[in-house]
């Protein structure tokens, strides 16, 4: 069995609960990120073995982490990993990385009636989109593997194959983690600040603000819509996390919304900068038990200048981009942008082929293209072409 450290649980024992993955009848790897496995020093053959599959499905146990969060503007004091399991962490040349499962079964934080499991389709979506984001240099969680579980789960479209995604992050601490600590005690907030690697609450806020505003500017340049920018989905590390109902808009259209759960357009494409500003203000509030209003206001006063610098750096010609028929075509013709992105319907067709027909070839063809997105030979010519609005409005579902 692979030995991992449990730095999160050791440092913040009041913010975890022990858990283990469900007993799955026939787990199998659908896609394995061999380069990432090699980088982490993981034996690829062992990962495919019976012992490796048990480890990848959480049979050996781990921890579910606690956090709070504003979900669509409403504060919930206790959320936590209801279908995720933190296996532990590994040392790397740059520090350490945490390995977490999504879809591995219920935990002590699962909502009543939740099965805690994942569907294969959304796990394939997270794998492919996160690896595309990494390929174009946008800070993100990595995906190590996607597995089928041998079970079916009931979702919006009926019974579908169960799935787990294994993801890697520098840290799974989020704004919601600070909010959870703030509800409990100043001492817990202070401990969390230290564990996150900051000396003061002001330093934490300033650094997270810089990271997240730059991240959103990078999202906007390529047309990425996160779809569920709740405070529990905003990582202190600045990594893009939780790809549930994400999508890409081909046109620089501020009102673009694809998520079925964002019925009022709170997290529309053009709202993302303002929503991140709102989330960062909630972070400042959560830090008040160990700071003061004047100090927090002083840091927040830098938000607008930081955003303008990020916008100018990452979106060099916003008016031209807004006027373009297709953002990807404009970026590759004028600013060295990627040839291939995970266009919505293209990705949806590939996922449906894998989920309904057990045909993973279209998925792997698209994966090859978007993980080498500047190489014209990595994908077919049609993959680089805009899809337009043909076929009516496109809708994404969280599906997990």
Image (cartoon, rainbow, N blue to C red):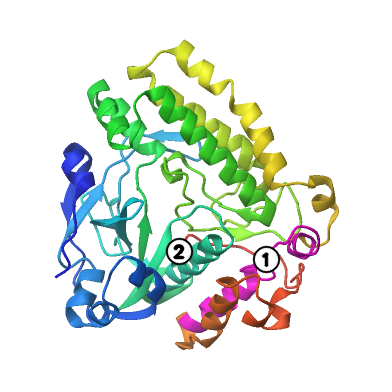
Residue at 35% x, 48% y: name it: 171
Q: CA distance from mark 2 to mark 1?
A: 28 Å
Q: Is residue 118 left or right of residue 351?
A: left
Residue 101 placement: quadrant: bottom left
Rendered image quadrant of residue 146: bottom left
Disc 1 element: loop
Q: Is residue 364 left or right of residue 20?
A: right
Specify start and end residues of the magenta stretch as a single range.
Answer: 328-354
Q: Quadrant of the N terminus?
A: bottom left
Q: Which residue is mark 1?
A: 338
Q: Are marks 2 and 1 in contact (CB under 8 Å)?
A: no
Where residue 72 sits: x, y (%)?
A: 50, 40
Q: Residue 277, how many percent across, how many down?
A: 57, 32
Q: Is residue 49 above or below residue 63?
A: below
Kindly identify the residue that appears in the image at 73 percent across and 81 percent down: 382
Number of numbered discs on residues: 2
Q: Is residue 343 visible?
A: yes
| Quadrant in the rendering for residue 251 | bottom right
Q: Along the line of sight, which residue is nearer the eye, 280 or 369?
A: 369
Horizontal and vertical percent for residue 96? 30, 52
Give SS at disc 2.
loop
Residue 399 numbered mark, or none: 2
**Quadrant of the image for the C terminus?**
bottom left
Q: Where in the figure is residue 214, as x and y percent of width and height?
A: 59, 42
At x 57% / y 62%, what residue is drawn? 396
First reached walking from the N terminus: tag 2 or tag 1 = 1
Residue 305 within the segment the image draws in magenta: no
* Local crowd size for mark 2, using a 10 Å CA cut-off: few (<14), some (14–19), many (≥20): some
Q: Please determine whether, in this image, residue 183 is positioned above or below residue 123.
A: above
Name, please, the residue furthest toward the front.
Answer: 93
In the image, 229: left or right of 180?
right
Per the image, is 350 magenta? yes
């Amino acid at each position: 069995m692979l030995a991992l450290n449990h730095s999160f649980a050791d440092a913040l024992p009041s913010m975890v609960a022990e858990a283990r993955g469900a007993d799955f009848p026939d787990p199998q790897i659908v896609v394995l990120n061999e380069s990432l496995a090699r980088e982490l020093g993981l034996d690829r053959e062992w990962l495919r073995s019976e012992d490796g599959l048990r480890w990848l499905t959480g049979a050996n146990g781990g921890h579910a982490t606690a956090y709070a969060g504003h979900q669509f503007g409403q504060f919930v004091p206790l959320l936590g990993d209801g279908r995720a399991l933190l296996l532990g962490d590994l040392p790397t040349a740059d520090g350490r990385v945490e390995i977490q499962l999504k879809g591995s079964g219920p935990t002590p934080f699962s909502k009543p009636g939740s099965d805690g499991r994942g569907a294969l389709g959304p796990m394939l979506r997270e794998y492919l989109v996160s690896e595309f984001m990494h390929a174009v240099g946008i800070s993100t969680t990595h995906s190590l593997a996607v597995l089928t579980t041998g079970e079916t789960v009931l979702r919006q479209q009926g019974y579908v194959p169960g799935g787990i995604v294994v993801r890697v992050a520098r840290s799974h601490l989020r704004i919601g983690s600070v909010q959870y600590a703030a509800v409990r005690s100043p001492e817990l907030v202070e401990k969390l600040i230290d564990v996150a690697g900051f000396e003061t609450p002001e330093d934490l806020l300033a650094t997270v603000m810089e990271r997240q505003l730059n991240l959103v500017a990078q999202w906007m340049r390529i047309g990425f819509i996160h779809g569920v920018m709740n405070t529990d989905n905003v990582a202190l590390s600045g990594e893009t996390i939780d790809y549930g109902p994400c999508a890409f808009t081909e046109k620089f259209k501020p009102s673009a919304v694809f998520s079925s759960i964002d019925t009022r357009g709170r997290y529309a494409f053009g709202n993302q900068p303002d929503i991140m500003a709102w989330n960062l203000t909630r972070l400042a509030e959560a830090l008040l038990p160990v700071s003061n209003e004047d100090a927090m206001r002083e840091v927040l006063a830098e938000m607008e200048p930081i955003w303008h610098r990020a916008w100018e750096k990452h979106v060099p010609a916003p008016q031209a981009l807004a006027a373009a028929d297709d953002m990807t075509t404009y970026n590759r013709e004028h600013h060295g942008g990627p040839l291939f992105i995970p266009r919505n319907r293209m990705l949806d067709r590939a996922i449906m082929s894998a989920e309904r027909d057990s045909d993973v070839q279209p998925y792997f063809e698209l994966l090859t293209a978007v993980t080498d997105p500047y190489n014209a030979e990595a994908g077919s010519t049609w993959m680089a072409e805009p899809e337009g609005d043909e076929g009516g409005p496109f809708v994404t579902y969280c599906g997990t």
